Image (cartoon, grey):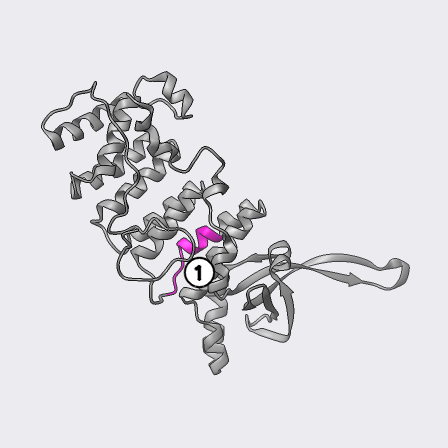
Amino acid sequence: MQDEFFALHLDAGDGDAASVCPFGRDFMADGRVRCVFSALTPVKMGMGASSRTHESLTFRFVEQTGEDDFASRLLSDRHLPIGEAELITLDELVEDYTPELAYFEEQVVPALLGRGAPEDVLAATVDAHAFNGLFGLGLVYLEHDETARASALFTDLARIRAGFEGRDQFLFNDFGIILRKCGRYDEAIAFFLRALDFVSDDENLFYNLARAHYENDDWTRSLDYLIQSHKFNPSLPVTKNLLALMVGLEGDERRLTRYHKPPVPPAVAARARQLLAAGSGRLKLDDTLVGRAVEPGRARSGGVGLVEFKRHGSDE
Protein backbone atom coordinates (compact mmCIF):
# COMPACT_ATOMS: atom_id res chain seq x y z
CA MET A 1 0.00 0.00 0.00
CA GLN A 2 1.07 3.55 -0.63
CA ASP A 3 1.58 5.92 2.28
CA GLU A 4 -0.95 8.35 0.77
CA PHE A 5 -3.53 5.88 1.99
CA PHE A 6 -2.87 7.07 5.51
CA ALA A 7 -3.64 10.71 4.72
CA LEU A 8 -6.80 10.18 6.77
CA HIS A 9 -4.72 10.07 9.92
CA LEU A 10 -2.31 12.79 8.87
CA ASP A 11 -4.70 15.38 7.45
CA ALA A 12 -4.16 17.65 10.47
CA GLY A 13 -0.47 17.95 9.67
CA ASP A 14 2.58 16.58 11.44
CA GLY A 15 2.62 19.32 14.08
CA ASP A 16 0.83 19.35 17.39
CA ALA A 17 -2.92 19.71 17.76
CA ALA A 18 -2.71 23.45 18.42
CA SER A 19 -1.68 24.02 14.80
CA VAL A 20 -5.24 23.27 13.66
CA CYS A 21 -7.13 24.54 16.71
CA PRO A 22 -8.84 27.90 16.11
CA PHE A 23 -8.27 30.89 18.38
CA GLY A 24 -10.77 31.17 21.18
CA ARG A 25 -10.86 34.96 20.92
CA ASP A 26 -12.34 34.60 17.42
CA PHE A 27 -15.41 32.97 18.96
CA MET A 28 -15.59 35.37 21.87
CA ALA A 29 -15.49 38.42 19.58
CA ASP A 30 -18.87 37.39 18.18
CA GLY A 31 -20.13 35.86 21.43
CA ARG A 32 -21.37 37.39 24.63
CA VAL A 33 -20.25 35.32 27.59
CA ARG A 34 -23.01 35.24 30.18
CA CYS A 35 -22.58 32.73 32.96
CA VAL A 36 -21.82 32.09 36.62
CA PHE A 37 -18.19 31.70 37.61
CA SER A 38 -16.58 30.65 40.86
CA ALA A 39 -13.59 32.58 42.17
CA LEU A 40 -11.35 32.51 45.21
CA THR A 41 -11.59 35.85 47.00
CA PRO A 42 -9.06 36.89 49.67
CA VAL A 43 -10.69 37.57 53.06
CA LYS A 44 -8.77 39.27 55.90
CA MET A 45 -9.55 38.13 59.43
CA GLY A 46 -8.49 39.93 62.63
CA MET A 47 -6.46 43.05 63.22
CA GLY A 48 -2.79 43.96 63.48
CA ALA A 49 -0.20 41.27 64.11
CA SER A 50 -2.87 38.65 64.71
CA SER A 51 -4.56 39.23 61.37
CA ARG A 52 -4.55 36.56 58.73
CA THR A 53 -5.87 36.20 55.24
CA HIS A 54 -7.58 33.20 53.73
CA GLU A 55 -9.36 32.58 50.45
CA SER A 56 -13.10 32.13 50.28
CA LEU A 57 -14.91 30.56 47.33
CA THR A 58 -17.50 32.91 45.92
CA PHE A 59 -19.86 32.74 42.98
CA ARG A 60 -20.15 35.65 40.59
CA PHE A 61 -22.38 36.50 37.67
CA VAL A 62 -20.20 37.54 34.72
CA GLU A 63 -21.29 39.23 31.50
CA GLN A 64 -19.05 40.09 28.56
CA THR A 65 -19.30 43.80 27.77
CA GLY A 66 -16.62 44.05 25.07
CA GLU A 67 -14.05 41.98 23.24
CA ASP A 68 -11.72 41.94 26.26
CA ASP A 69 -14.00 43.36 28.97
CA PHE A 70 -16.28 41.68 31.49
CA ALA A 71 -18.54 42.82 34.34
CA SER A 72 -18.48 40.62 37.44
CA ARG A 73 -21.09 40.81 40.23
CA LEU A 74 -21.30 38.81 43.43
CA LEU A 75 -24.21 36.37 43.82
CA SER A 76 -26.32 36.43 46.95
CA ASP A 77 -27.48 33.36 48.85
CA ARG A 78 -30.68 33.68 46.80
CA HIS A 79 -28.60 33.16 43.62
CA LEU A 80 -29.12 36.73 42.44
CA PRO A 81 -26.46 39.29 41.37
CA ILE A 82 -25.92 42.01 44.00
CA GLY A 83 -23.72 45.04 44.47
CA GLU A 84 -21.66 47.05 42.06
CA ALA A 85 -20.09 45.34 39.06
CA GLU A 86 -16.34 44.84 39.07
CA LEU A 87 -14.73 45.29 35.67
CA ILE A 88 -12.21 42.60 34.74
CA THR A 89 -10.23 41.64 31.63
CA LEU A 90 -10.19 38.36 29.73
CA ASP A 91 -6.79 37.53 31.22
CA GLU A 92 -8.21 38.02 34.71
CA LEU A 93 -11.25 35.93 33.84
CA VAL A 94 -9.04 33.08 32.62
CA GLU A 95 -6.62 33.28 35.53
CA ASP A 96 -9.01 33.74 38.46
CA TYR A 97 -12.46 32.48 37.45
CA THR A 98 -13.92 29.04 36.72
CA PRO A 99 -17.20 28.71 34.76
CA GLU A 100 -20.13 27.04 36.53
CA LEU A 101 -22.64 26.52 33.72
CA ALA A 102 -24.69 23.87 35.52
CA TYR A 103 -25.12 26.14 38.57
CA PHE A 104 -26.11 28.99 36.26
CA GLU A 105 -28.80 26.92 34.54
CA GLU A 106 -30.10 25.15 37.65
CA GLN A 107 -30.08 27.95 40.22
CA VAL A 108 -29.40 31.41 38.83
CA VAL A 109 -31.61 31.34 35.73
CA PRO A 110 -34.75 30.34 37.72
CA ALA A 111 -33.95 32.98 40.36
CA LEU A 112 -33.56 35.72 37.74
CA LEU A 113 -36.74 34.70 35.94
CA GLY A 114 -38.55 34.55 39.27
CA ARG A 115 -37.61 38.14 40.07
CA GLY A 116 -38.85 39.03 36.60
CA ALA A 117 -37.35 42.44 35.91
CA PRO A 118 -36.64 43.05 32.20
CA GLU A 119 -32.88 43.17 32.84
CA ASP A 120 -33.15 39.89 34.78
CA VAL A 121 -34.91 38.15 31.91
CA LEU A 122 -32.15 39.29 29.56
CA ALA A 123 -29.45 38.14 32.00
CA ALA A 124 -31.10 34.73 32.25
CA THR A 125 -30.94 34.18 28.49
CA VAL A 126 -28.60 31.48 27.21
CA ASP A 127 -28.55 31.98 23.46
CA ALA A 128 -26.33 31.20 20.48
CA HIS A 129 -24.03 34.14 21.20
CA ALA A 130 -23.53 33.08 24.82
CA PHE A 131 -22.87 29.50 23.73
CA ASN A 132 -20.39 30.66 21.11
CA GLY A 133 -18.60 32.84 23.66
CA LEU A 134 -18.32 30.07 26.25
CA PHE A 135 -17.00 27.67 23.62
CA GLY A 136 -14.40 30.26 22.71
CA LEU A 137 -13.49 30.60 26.38
CA GLY A 138 -12.88 26.86 26.46
CA LEU A 139 -10.45 27.23 23.56
CA VAL A 140 -8.73 30.10 25.39
CA TYR A 141 -8.27 27.77 28.37
CA LEU A 142 -6.55 25.30 26.04
CA GLU A 143 -4.26 28.08 24.80
CA HIS A 144 -3.30 28.74 28.43
CA ASP A 145 -2.81 25.01 29.18
CA GLU A 146 -5.81 25.08 31.52
CA THR A 147 -6.91 21.72 30.20
CA ALA A 148 -8.97 20.65 33.23
CA ARG A 149 -11.11 23.78 33.13
CA ALA A 150 -11.43 23.51 29.35
CA SER A 151 -12.58 19.90 29.60
CA ALA A 152 -15.12 20.71 32.32
CA LEU A 153 -16.55 23.62 30.30
CA PHE A 154 -16.80 21.62 27.06
CA THR A 155 -18.51 18.81 28.98
CA ASP A 156 -21.05 21.25 30.44
CA LEU A 157 -21.70 22.78 27.02
CA ALA A 158 -22.39 19.35 25.56
CA ARG A 159 -25.02 18.88 28.30
CA ILE A 160 -26.59 22.34 28.06
CA ARG A 161 -30.31 22.40 28.77
CA ALA A 162 -31.28 25.81 27.43
CA GLY A 163 -33.12 25.84 24.16
CA PHE A 164 -32.19 28.51 21.64
CA GLU A 165 -32.30 29.08 17.91
CA GLY A 166 -29.52 27.07 16.31
CA ARG A 167 -29.25 24.43 19.04
CA ASP A 168 -29.48 21.36 16.84
CA GLN A 169 -27.41 18.56 15.36
CA PHE A 170 -25.46 20.99 13.18
CA LEU A 171 -24.32 23.02 16.17
CA PHE A 172 -23.06 20.06 18.19
CA ASN A 173 -21.64 18.32 15.13
CA ASP A 174 -19.71 21.41 14.00
CA PHE A 175 -18.28 22.05 17.44
CA GLY A 176 -17.42 18.35 17.73
CA ILE A 177 -15.39 18.59 14.53
CA ILE A 178 -13.49 21.57 15.92
CA LEU A 179 -12.75 19.73 19.16
CA ARG A 180 -11.51 16.69 17.24
CA LYS A 181 -9.17 18.92 15.24
CA CYS A 182 -7.93 20.34 18.56
CA GLY A 183 -7.10 16.81 19.71
CA ARG A 184 -9.90 16.85 22.33
CA TYR A 185 -11.34 13.50 21.33
CA ASP A 186 -13.42 12.70 24.42
CA GLU A 187 -15.11 16.10 24.33
CA ALA A 188 -15.63 15.80 20.56
CA ILE A 189 -17.36 12.47 21.09
CA ALA A 190 -19.62 14.05 23.74
CA PHE A 191 -20.69 16.74 21.25
CA PHE A 192 -21.32 14.19 18.50
CA LEU A 193 -23.38 12.07 20.87
CA ARG A 194 -25.43 15.12 21.83
CA ALA A 195 -26.07 15.70 18.12
CA LEU A 196 -27.72 12.27 18.06
CA ASP A 197 -30.46 13.74 20.28
CA PHE A 198 -31.63 15.65 17.21
CA VAL A 199 -31.05 13.17 14.38
CA SER A 200 -30.56 9.41 14.38
CA ASP A 201 -30.09 8.55 10.70
CA ASP A 202 -27.24 10.77 9.50
CA GLU A 203 -24.42 8.71 8.01
CA ASN A 204 -21.99 11.64 8.25
CA LEU A 205 -22.60 12.09 11.96
CA PHE A 206 -21.97 8.39 12.58
CA TYR A 207 -18.80 8.66 10.50
CA ASN A 208 -17.67 11.62 12.61
CA LEU A 209 -18.14 9.53 15.74
CA ALA A 210 -16.17 6.70 14.13
CA ARG A 211 -13.41 9.11 13.13
CA ALA A 212 -13.13 10.54 16.65
CA HIS A 213 -12.87 7.05 18.13
CA TYR A 214 -10.27 6.13 15.51
CA GLU A 215 -8.21 9.19 16.47
CA ASN A 216 -8.68 8.14 20.10
CA ASP A 217 -7.18 4.72 19.28
CA ASP A 218 -10.41 2.80 19.89
CA TRP A 219 -10.80 0.51 16.88
CA THR A 220 -13.82 -1.34 18.28
CA ARG A 221 -15.99 1.70 18.98
CA SER A 222 -14.88 3.22 15.70
CA LEU A 223 -16.12 0.14 13.88
CA ASP A 224 -19.44 0.26 15.76
CA TYR A 225 -20.19 3.71 14.37
CA LEU A 226 -18.88 2.83 10.91
CA ILE A 227 -21.43 0.01 10.85
CA GLN A 228 -24.16 2.57 11.57
CA SER A 229 -22.84 4.95 8.92
CA HIS A 230 -22.62 2.12 6.39
CA LYS A 231 -26.19 1.07 7.20
CA PHE A 232 -27.57 4.48 6.22
CA ASN A 233 -25.27 5.02 3.22
CA PRO A 234 -23.14 2.07 2.03
CA SER A 235 -21.57 4.32 -0.63
CA LEU A 236 -20.20 7.07 1.63
CA PRO A 237 -16.53 7.31 0.53
CA VAL A 238 -15.03 8.33 3.88
CA THR A 239 -16.73 5.44 5.67
CA LYS A 240 -15.40 2.98 3.11
CA ASN A 241 -11.92 4.52 3.38
CA LEU A 242 -11.80 4.10 7.16
CA LEU A 243 -13.04 0.52 6.87
CA ALA A 244 -10.32 -0.12 4.28
CA LEU A 245 -7.75 1.44 6.60
CA MET A 246 -8.71 -1.02 9.33
CA VAL A 247 -8.17 -3.87 6.90
CA GLY A 248 -4.92 -2.41 5.59
CA LEU A 249 -3.38 -1.85 9.03
CA GLU A 250 -4.14 -5.28 10.42
CA GLY A 251 -0.83 -6.94 11.12
CA ASP A 252 1.22 -4.13 9.54
CA GLU A 253 3.49 -3.45 12.50
CA ARG A 254 5.69 -1.01 10.60
CA ARG A 255 2.88 1.35 9.72
CA LEU A 256 1.15 0.91 13.09
CA THR A 257 4.36 2.05 14.74
CA ARG A 258 4.95 4.85 12.26
CA TYR A 259 1.48 6.32 12.78
CA HIS A 260 1.32 5.55 16.53
CA LYS A 261 -1.74 3.33 16.28
CA PRO A 262 -2.51 0.25 18.38
CA PRO A 263 -2.95 -3.15 16.72
CA VAL A 264 -6.22 -3.68 14.89
CA PRO A 265 -8.12 -6.54 16.58
CA PRO A 266 -8.64 -9.42 14.12
CA ALA A 267 -12.40 -9.38 14.70
CA VAL A 268 -12.54 -5.68 13.79
CA ALA A 269 -10.57 -6.19 10.58
CA ALA A 270 -12.71 -9.20 9.67
CA ARG A 271 -15.94 -7.24 10.12
CA ALA A 272 -14.52 -4.34 8.11
CA ARG A 273 -13.68 -6.76 5.28
CA GLN A 274 -17.21 -8.10 5.42
CA LEU A 275 -18.75 -4.63 5.14
CA LEU A 276 -16.49 -3.67 2.24
CA ALA A 277 -17.25 -6.91 0.43
CA ALA A 278 -20.98 -6.42 0.96
CA GLY A 279 -20.76 -2.95 -0.53
CA SER A 280 -18.69 -3.83 -3.58
CA GLY A 281 -19.52 -7.47 -4.19
CA ARG A 282 -15.80 -8.32 -4.00
CA LEU A 283 -12.72 -7.39 -2.04
CA LYS A 284 -9.13 -7.62 -3.21
CA LEU A 285 -7.01 -7.35 -0.11
CA ASP A 286 -3.89 -6.50 -2.12
CA ASP A 287 -5.48 -3.56 -3.96
CA THR A 288 -3.67 -0.24 -3.70
CA LEU A 289 -5.89 1.88 -1.46
CA VAL A 290 -5.50 5.66 -1.63
CA GLY A 291 -7.17 7.73 1.10
CA ARG A 292 -9.14 10.87 0.32
CA ALA A 293 -9.52 14.07 2.26
CA VAL A 294 -12.44 14.01 4.67
CA GLU A 295 -15.47 15.24 2.76
CA PRO A 296 -18.15 17.59 4.07
CA GLY A 297 -21.53 16.04 4.41
CA ARG A 298 -25.06 16.75 5.43
CA ALA A 299 -24.26 17.18 9.13
CA ARG A 300 -20.82 18.74 8.98
CA SER A 301 -19.34 21.98 7.80
CA GLY A 302 -15.71 21.05 8.41
CA GLY A 303 -14.85 24.70 8.96
CA VAL A 304 -13.13 26.31 11.89
CA GLY A 305 -13.56 29.76 13.30
CA LEU A 306 -16.96 31.20 14.11
CA VAL A 307 -19.81 28.74 13.90
CA GLU A 308 -22.80 30.04 12.03
CA PHE A 309 -26.07 28.77 13.41
CA LYS A 310 -27.86 27.61 10.31
CA ARG A 311 -30.23 24.91 9.23
CA HIS A 312 -28.12 23.40 6.47
CA GLY A 313 -24.55 22.12 6.37
CA SER A 314 -21.95 23.93 4.32
CA ASP A 315 -20.43 22.51 1.18
CA GLU A 316 -17.04 23.99 2.15
Expressed as whole percent of the image width and height from the top left, the position of residue 172 reads 35, 54
| SS type, badge 1 | helix
Residue placed farthest to the bottom in the image? 117
> Does 122 sit left or right of 212 as displayed?
right
Callout 1 environment at 10 Å: few (<14), some (14 to 19), or many (20+)?
Answer: many
> Does 145 sit left or right of 41 as displayed?
left
Q: Nearer the viewer, residue 106 or 162?
A: 162
From which residue to which does the magenta span run? 153-162
Q: Is residue 12 above or below residue 102?
A: above
Q: Which residue is at a point 57% across and 73% down the rendered structure image?
A: 81
Going by the numbered disc 1, the residue's amino acid type is: Asn
Query: Which residue carries the number 1 mark?
Result: 132
Is residue 163 in the magenta section?
no
Q: Which residue is at a point 16% across and 39% down the rendered structure image?
A: 235
Q: Which residue is at a point 44% across and 51% down the rendered structure image?
A: 155
Secondary structure predominantly adopted by residues drawn in magenta? helix
Expressed as whole percent of the image width and height from the top left, the position of residue 239 reads 24, 37
> Does 214 sit left or right of 150 as displayed?
left
Q: Quadrant of the N terminus?
A: top left
Quarter where residue 289 is shown: top left
Q: Is residue 65 above or below residue 227?
A: below
Q: Nearer the viewer, residue 17 or 269?
A: 17
Expressed as whole percent of the image width and height from the top left, the position of residue 5 reads 30, 28
Q: Nearer the viewer, residue 303 or 190?
A: 303
Is residue 156 in the magenta section?
yes
